[in-house]
Image (cartoon, rainbow, N blue to C red):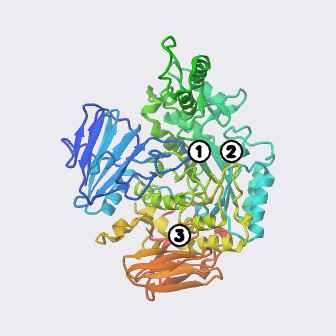
């Protein structure tokens, strides 16, 4: 059962799509206080587990730390970070009592989950203007299904988007992309997509191409003839430049975010001075979305939206303030950290750390987020009050435009920043991670939490975006990426090149990525079933084995679909790992010679050997999964080679469709395999 409580005058985020009648009175759980902003306080039992928060740091169980929903461009995903790119305000308290909470609030929201006091959950925000949804259920899994039903169907990408993709910040020319395609095809390493980062544009201007792409439609066809889709990036900032049509149209029609005085807000991002499209304004959102047609008309079938927190390098106002502080420091500065030991006659002495803090805070400044406004139904809304909705509505702009461009066709779309509701328009990648072993585990732990919030098409930058990867790290990252719906290798300018053909014994990469294609009929089938029934693709073990106390504590293994469990290796020099089996399972390994080993293991703890060039999974007792022969692209998967592995006598319900159109009829597209 879902109950809706209204406090103050909430901003309509459009996260919820079902009509839920407001409930009078107070929630059955916790205490609400609206005297000074808003707070919800609940005293947790010692064994309560807290699930949710989507793309958040740390574990599957969120208990024991403080998290802040405040979409933030931060490339250093260390344990102390409280905010990442998404704002996913849904949690579940699981224990003697099971209930879910969705705080539909588009600004900064703090989840203190046993941080200040170990037994206390406190959710708070500055303004008591929000909708609180309280969901009762028998189990956490039941609560997730109810929540997913009220926020609407998850985005469904085209089937090619389940193939492997290669990306790197720094591909600039047609020859750069051709070299990548050649490197994969000549070495017979499967590939379906090459991503185009910011350098494909003319001076980082959205919906433009640099001079290297004279006949872009022909190049798109050339790549597609090799079964490779080009997937360009679109950034949130529109360059301020006379003669640039997107800029001039936005200025003319007042479709950019504005300062309080009505002038267009200016922020510095990749192109230099930029304006932000006012994507919370339906007219501006339609205008910006229709700009994607510039690329779809040339054959492009997929995009990734970036810098849409929105990221700000600095604003003119912030730069003026920093210059003034620097002047004061030059005149009266001290090496004392805060200027507190200034001489009596000097009233405005500036400490060296104060200056450093100011320069460091120019980027993504909270002051800047208070400097611009959105036009929402004729009312000017200050950005910080609705900050977490920007990435959602930028991706919504594209999703709504695709319905106009070709309503029967699926387009690939995923985003960096998001709010619940965006899951209907696109997926997400988890942002600028690092080539760290700990980020394999962080990737794993984010997946079920994202699924709880509706984001099924998700994945991380395999091998790590920042820092230098290693051969073994990339192989272990890929062995997890085999199972994530979005499977992409991406790296930053200036880091070690990490295309799979750059390393010795590339046959190991060919094999590991090849396993993705062998499993793709199963992975696609489970994704589609989850999307069409408001279910989860990845689940914590406790959701499947609710009476198993040990399963509820396992955070480095996941259930995938209804048949398998995954347990990747995520430690440097690891030759294998310990796994906990809540029931008898078949331990399956895809071996580098193309064979598949199967071994029955009983319930309990086991150590299993897993070589760098092996991909493991576990099939649940009495179940089976389909596999096919490997292929070098999704288009060439041969379903005639399909066979079942797992337990003898088991059957599997396979969902399959053309992967292009939106005919999602479950009965027509499913068949039983025996």
Task: Name the residue rendered at 80%, 42% in the picture.
Answer: 211
Of residues 635 and 74, the one nearer the viewer is 74
For the residues marked 1 and 3, what is the alpha-carbon distance in whole angstroms?
Answer: 30 Å
Report which quarter residue 564 is drawn in: bottom left
* Dot placed on the residue nearer the N-terminal end, 2 or 3: 2
* Dot placed on the residue nearer the N-terminal end, 1 or 3: 1
Tell me, for residue 306, which label it has, or none.
1
Tell me, for residue 615, which label it has, or none.
none
Q: Position of residue 493 (x, y in %)?
A: 70, 49
Q: Position of residue 186 (x, y in %)?
A: 78, 69
Q: Position of residue 75 (x, y in %)?
A: 56, 46
| Mark 3 crowdedness (10 Å alpha carbons): few <14, some 14-19, many ≥20 | many
Residue 665 shows in the view: no
Task: Tell me if label 1 and label 2 are in contact, CB under 8 Å.
Answer: yes
For the residues marked 1 and 2, what is the alpha-carbon distance in whole angstroms?
Answer: 10 Å
Tell me, for residue 198, which label it has, or none.
2
For the residues marked 2 and 3, what is the alpha-carbon distance in whole angstroms?
Answer: 33 Å
Of residues 223 and 64, the one nearer the viewer is 64
Furthest-bottom residue in this view: 648
Nearest-to-viewer mark from 1 and 3: 3
Report which quarter residue 313 is drawn in: top right
Residue 20 shows in the view: yes
Of residues 658 and 311, the one nearer the viewer is 311
Q: Which residue is mark 3?
A: 569
Q: Secondary structure at mark 3?
A: loop
| Mark 1 crowdedness (10 Å alpha carbons): few <14, some 14-19, many ≥20 | many
Task: Name the residue rendered at 25%, 44% in the picture.
Answer: 41
* Dot placed on the residue nearer the N-terminal end, 1 or 2: 2
Q: Secondary structure at mark 1?
A: strand
């Amino acid at each position: 059962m879902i109950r809706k409580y209204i406090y103050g005058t909430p901003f309509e985020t459009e996260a919820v799509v079902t009509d839920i009648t407001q409930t009078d009175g107070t929630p059955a759980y916790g205490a609400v206080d609206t005297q000074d902003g808003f707070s919800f306080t609940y005293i947790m039992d010692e064994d309560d587990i807290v699930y949710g928060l989507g793309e958040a740091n740390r574990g599957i169980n969120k208990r024991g730390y403080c998290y802040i929903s405040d979409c933030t461009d931060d490339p250093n995903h260390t344990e102390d970070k409280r905010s990442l790119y998404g704002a996913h305000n849904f949690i579940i308290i699981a224990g003697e009592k099971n209930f879910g909470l969705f705080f539909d609030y588009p600004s900064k929201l703090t989840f203190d989950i046993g941080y200040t006091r170990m037994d206390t959950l406190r959710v708070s925000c500055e303004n008591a203007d929000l909708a609180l949804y309280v969901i009762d259920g028998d189990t956490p899994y039941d609560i997730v299904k109810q929540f997913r039903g009220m926020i609407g169907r998850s985005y469904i990408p085209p089937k090619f988007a389940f193939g492997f993709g290669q990306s790197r910040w720094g591909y600039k020319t047609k020859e750069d992309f051709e070299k990548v395609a050649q490197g994969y095809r000549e070495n017979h390493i499967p590939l379906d997509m090459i991503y185009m980062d910011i350098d494909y544009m003319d001076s980082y201007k959205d919906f433009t191409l640099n001079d290297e792409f004279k006949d872009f439609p022909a190049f798109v066809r050339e790549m597609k003839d090799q079964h490779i889709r080009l997937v360009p990036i679109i950034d949130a900032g529109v360059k301020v430049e006379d003669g640039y049509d997107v800029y001039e149209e936005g200025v003319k029609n007042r479709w950019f975010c504005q300062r309080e005085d009505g002038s267009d807000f200016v922020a510095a991002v990749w192109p230099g001075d930029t304006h932000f499209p006012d994507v919370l304004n339906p007219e501006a959102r339609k205008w910006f979305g229709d700009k994607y047609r510039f690329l779809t008309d040339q054959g492009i079938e997929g995009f990734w939206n970036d810098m849409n927190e929105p990221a700000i390098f600095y604003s003119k106002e912030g730069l003026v303030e920093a210059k003034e502080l620097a002047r004061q420091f030059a005149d009266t500065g001290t090496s004392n950290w805060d200027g507190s030991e200034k001489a009596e006659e000097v009233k405005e002495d500036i400490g060296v750390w104060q200056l450093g803090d100011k320069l460091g805070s120019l980027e993504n400044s909270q002051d800047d987020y208070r400097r611009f406004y959105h036009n929402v139904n004729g009312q000017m809304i200050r950005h910080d009050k609705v900050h977490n909705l920007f990435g959602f509505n930028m991706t919504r702009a594209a999703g709504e435009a695709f319905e106009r461009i070709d309503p029967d066709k699926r387009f690939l779309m995923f985003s960096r920043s998001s709010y619940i509701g965006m899951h209907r328009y696109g997926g997400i990648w988890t942002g600028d991670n690092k080539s760290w072993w700990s980020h394999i585990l962080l990737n794993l732990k984010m997946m079920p939490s994202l699924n709880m919030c509706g984001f099924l098409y998700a994945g991380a930058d395999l091998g790590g975006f920042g820092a230098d990867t290693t051969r073994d790290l990339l192989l272990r990252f890929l062995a997890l990426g085999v199972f994530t719906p979005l499977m992409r290798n991406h790296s930053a300018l200036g880091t070690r090149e990490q295309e799979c053909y750059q390393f010795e014994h590339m046959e190991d990469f060919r094999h590991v990525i090849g396993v993705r294609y062998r499993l793709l009929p199963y992975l696609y089938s489970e994704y589609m079933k989850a999307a069409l029934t408001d279910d989860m693709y990845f689940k914590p073990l406790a959701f499947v084995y609710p009476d198993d106390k040990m399963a509820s504590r396992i955070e480095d293994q996941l259930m995938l679909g209804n048949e398998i469990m995954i347990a990747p290796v995520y430690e440097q020099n690891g030759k294998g790992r310990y796994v906990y089996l809540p029931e008898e399972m078949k331990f399956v390994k895809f071996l580098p010679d193309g064979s598949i080993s199967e071994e029955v293991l009983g319930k309990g703890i086991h150590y299993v050997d897993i070589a760098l060039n092996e991909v493991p999974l576990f099939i649940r007792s009495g179940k089976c999964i389909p596999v096919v022969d490997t292929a070098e692209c999704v288009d060439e998967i041969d379903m005639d080679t399909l066979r079942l592995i797992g337990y003898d006598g088991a059957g599997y319900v396979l969902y399959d469709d053309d992967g292009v159109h939106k005919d999602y009829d479950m009965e027509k597209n499913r068949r039983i395999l025996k």
